[in-house]
Amino acid sequence: MKPPRETTIVVAKVIVFVLCLLPLGHLAWDVAQQTLGPDPVAALEHRSGDWALRLLLITLAITPLRRLTGVAALIRLRRMLGLFAFFYATVHLAIYLVIDLGGFWRQLFSEIVKRPYITVGFLAWLLLVPLALTSTKGMMRRLGRRWGKLHKLVYAIGLLAVLHYLWQVKYGQKIAVREPLIYLSIYLALMAARLPWPAWFARLRRSVRPESGA
């Protein structure tokens, strides 16, 4: 029988897993009901890309939240969230390649040259691939310290993903600039939270997680 703490973590993982699948289910439902609007391909691309970015930012938020709250078990959810971010990014790319480009993959290279937002988006996906492939405990043991260095690529990936979204506004993708700027602000805040904590942040941490008498 698993100890209570392990049972709680298993339950939390199941809940997170189901929650991460809900956007895909919602997307599939809208496809079946034909309620994606006048440009269904664009809707599929944008919604899958939105969830890839959201899950990537949630993954980046795990470490600051752990430091702020002292709940070390949050780290146990990070790998699943990161893999779902990669999954939705792959769905996003697949929709673009298979449906938008109609399977003419060679056109992708000309699009990469012509449109910088596609360049940075494709680069972000490429950098996610080795992180997904090395996300297992076995690869962590094999790579040792190199694993941590490799997975710091997620910081650059986050910036590339935000730039990919922001630059779509410039290239007339019918996206309001406010939402990409919100994501950029969240990304910058998450990066700032990784800097050495100033005195006010230390006080905030103590207010969220009161020091025990032990």
Image (spheres, helix red, strand yellow):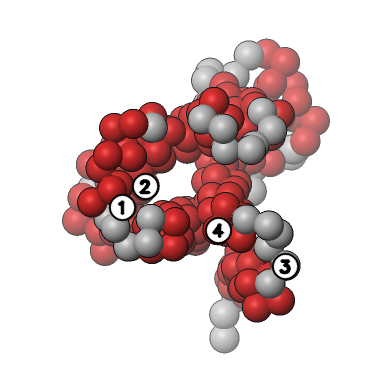
Q: CA distance from mark 1 to mark 2?
A: 7 Å
Q: Are the two marked residues, 1 and 4, in contact with CB atoms closer than 8 angstroms? A: no
- The label nearer to you, 1 versus 2, is 2
Q: Residue under label 1, please give it.
A: 129
Is residue 42 shown above or below 63? Answer: below
Which amino acid lies under the numbered mark 3 shown in the image of this protein?
Thr
Front residue of 169/200: it is 169
Residue denoted by label 4? 41
Q: Are marks 1 and 2 in contact (CB under 8 Å)?
A: yes
**Pointer 3 or 2: first along the chain:** 3
Q: Sequence-wise, which precedes: disc 1 or disc 4?
A: 4
Query: In the image, residue 45 lies at what x, y percent?
Result: 53, 54
Q: Hey, what amino acid is under mark 1?
A: Val
Residue at disc 4, secondary structure: helix
How much space separates mark 1 and mark 4, taking CA atoms? Answer: 24 Å
Is residue 67 depicted above or below 105 in this figure?
above
The residue beneath circle 3 is 35
